[in-house]
Image: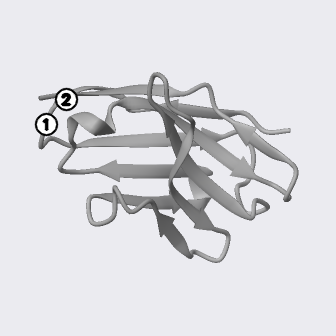
Amino acid sequence: QVQLVESGGGLVQAGGSLRLSCAASRSIRSFYFMGWYRQAPGNQRELVARISNGGTTNYADSVKGRFTISRDMAKNTVFLQMNSLKPEDTAVYYCNAEETLVVSYWGQGTQVTVLS
């Protein structure tokens, strides 16, 4: 088991920036992937970005060039730097830790609202 606690969400004007943090209750080295997902009202949860335990990153096409995922292994924390935010980025953002193909953990989510 692991607890994931997100923080850093909020209200921002279009074009602004936010940095999300996800603090894990134990070492993140054991997870194949740490990722950020988001879910807007009426939409399915979608992958935003993820980072493998080897450091490889993947991004949704809609956020490439604007968002950056990173991690601090010593602090068991994963970050999502979001720049040039758009109203369509408005969603609840969830941290995910993938331990195996069938076992993953979710945080409680943090709301990001981008005003036009």
Q: CA distance from mark 1 to mark 2?
A: 7 Å
Camera-nearest residue between 101 and 33: 101
Label 2 packing within 10 angstroms: few (<14), some (14-19), many (20+): some
Whether residue 15 sits left or right of residue 72 in the image: it is: left
Residue at the image point whose x is 51% and y is 70% from the top: 57
Is residue 99 placed above or below 115 in the rendered structure?
below
Residue at the image point whose x is 21% and y is 43% from the top: 85
Whether residue 31 sits left or right of residue 42 in the image: it is: right
Whether residue 112 sits left or right of residue 25 in the image: it is: left
Q: Quadrant of the N terminus?
A: top right
Q: Which mark is residue 14?
A: 1
Q: Position of residue 80 (x, y in %)?
A: 41, 50
Which residue is disc 2 drawn over? 12
| Residue type of the residue flagged with mark 2 | Val
Whether residue 3 sits left or right of residue 56 in the image: it is: right
| Residue type of the residue flagged with mark 1 | Ala
Is residue 37 placed above or below 59 in the rendered structure?
above
Q: Position of residue 70 (x, y in %)?
A: 46, 61
